Amino acid sequence: MKQGKLPITLIRAPIVSKIGNMNNEATPAIGFAYLSGYLRKFDYEPVLVDAIGEGINQVWPLKKYPGFQAQGLNFKEIINRIPKNSKVIGFSLMFSSEWPLTRDLLNEVRKYFPDALFVGGGEHVTGLAEYSLKDCQALDVCVRGEGEQTFTELIKAYESTGNYEEVSGIAYLDKDQVFHQDQSPPPRIRKVDEIGWPFWPDGYLEKFWASGKSYGVATEKDMPFMVSRGCPYQCTFCSSPDMWTTRYTLRDVNDVIEEAKFYIQRFGITSLQFYDLTAITKKSWIVEFCRKLLKEEIKVNWSLPSGTRSEALDSESLGLLRQTGCNYLVYAPESASLRTLKNIKKKIKLDQLTKSVLEAKRQNLTVRINLIIGFPEETWIDIFKTILYGLKMSFYGVDEAPLYIFSPYPGTEIFKTLNRENKIILNDSYFLELNSLNSSYFSTKIVSHNPRVNPILLGMIRTLFMMANYLVGYLFFPKRIFRTLKNIFSPHEAVTVLEHRLRDLIQRKKAA
């Protein structure tokens, strides 16, 4: 077979969620878009089978997992879309909360493609490579960490020699079921600008836009976008150090601007949504980006729905954000307890972050802050400090302050500690608990990994806080009531994620 022509298919499984949830909405697969763009540089033309994008609002119950549902194509529909000549099939194994269903999908696909090489990549298999390989016999090899270069090297090796054992950054079981994995951290691409732009197949993004799907707040045509790779910090509840190492790289501003201009010309996009883990760390970068948007007269909204830090967001930079159309800004303090912040290695200055949040509101930016309670070492005093902080921020005008309950995700430092102490049992129940914990805000069936905290009480407090939080916001800013009612019935517009998720829930009910 000619080098560079090996038939490759990339598959993203359906979304898994608790029945009646408001989270886990359909978003474009930017990871596969980057991987596809990189592979095309080497003359490979992968086929994307995205069960989520091709089955938007298609919801079906999971009989094997009572209380849970899938959103997207069913297994038969997925298999029918896989080209029959596929020699390598890559699966997105990003979220541990969706592992049981994705594993079942791999096993089902294997029945129809017994000779294809099955490759998994993403945060789940990076953190749990050995477990995943032994739990799913259909899976041949795991790509750990950043995927473009490692997956491409694996494809080249497999195409030329029929094996891949010498490729760096992978994990696999040999013929005797012995596990092999490099002990060194996953390799990183040194020059991030050389990865290239993501490749979006014709008609792919249009399906999400037509259905009003978006990562954060919605406009008519929201474009997935990334300006950095990795994160320089080592928060103990985050799997980024395991997946990306702590190497943080920002793209060249000029390349970012050219990509934005290309999307405006090709698609007529209305917003850029930054999917970055930590988009803003350098004031000089964000100031240069904003000033070039103004200089080039690029008129498009942009937002940071993943959350970012406050060090670079002072009065000047926030003014530029507002001036250039930033329509949604998310901060990630996580906790208001200095003791908790120290324990989870969240290296922020809370007073500085608060000052930045208030300045953002003064400049009329739509702002959200992400909060988490229930960390293993927390006391009730720590938890109440976070709750009171969230309510105070709502009183000061913060548009959203969601309260999440701590989840011990594979690949995180806290997970490794709990697993080492035998406080976590890896099985389907554990993975599904990760899914349900923060997808149903009114559930009190909580699994707590904090011996000081009653799980039922923790769930009740989360529910009461969420109700109080929005009550405070609507009570002191009554215009938001009319805005929310208007936006949840709008085909595209939404100012907050709550409005977007309520609208999505209504759409799914209508489609059911």
Image (cartoon, helix red, strand yellow):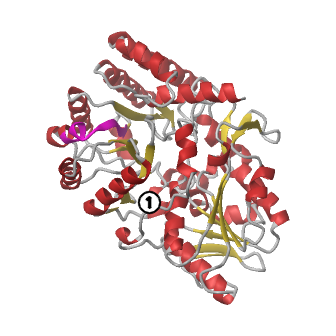
Image height of 505 relative to 176, above or below: above
Q: Residue furthest right?
A: 111
Q: Which residues are magenta?
A: 320-333
Picture layout, residue 118 above or below residue 57: below
Numbered label tally: 1
Name the residue located 64 percent from the left edge and 52 percent from the top edge.
422
Secondary element at tag 1 = helix
In the rendered structure, the answer to whether residue 33 lies left or right of residue 507 reads: left
Q: Position of residue 203 (x, y in %)?
A: 57, 51
Q: Which residue is mark 1?
A: 241
Residue positioned most to the left: 316
The answer to whether residue 164 shows anywhere in this view is no
Q: Position of residue 482 (x, y in %)?
A: 41, 13
Is residue 491 shown in magenta? no
Q: Nearer the viewer, residue 277 or 83?
A: 83
The picture quadrant where one finds residue 177 is bottom right
* Camera sees residue 213: yes
For image coordinates 61% across by 86% down, the residue present is 3
Instruction: Tell me the quadrant of the picture where the C terminus can be found.
Output: top right
In percent of width and height, residue 67 lies at 74, 32
Type of residue at label 1? Pro
Task: Give how far across and how far down residue 395 sits, in percent.
Answer: 31, 18
> Badge 1: how crowded within 10 Å, few (<14), some, or many (20+)?
many
Question: In what quadrant of the picture does the N terminus appear?
Answer: bottom right
Specify the quadrant of the image occupied by residue 459.
top right
In this view of the protein, which residue sits in the foreground, 136 or 237?
136
Instruction: Give the residue at x 66% y 47%.
Output: 54
In the image: residue 81, left or right of residue 47: right
Q: Pick the residue in front: 127 or 315.
A: 315
| Side (left or right) of 311 relative to 267 | left
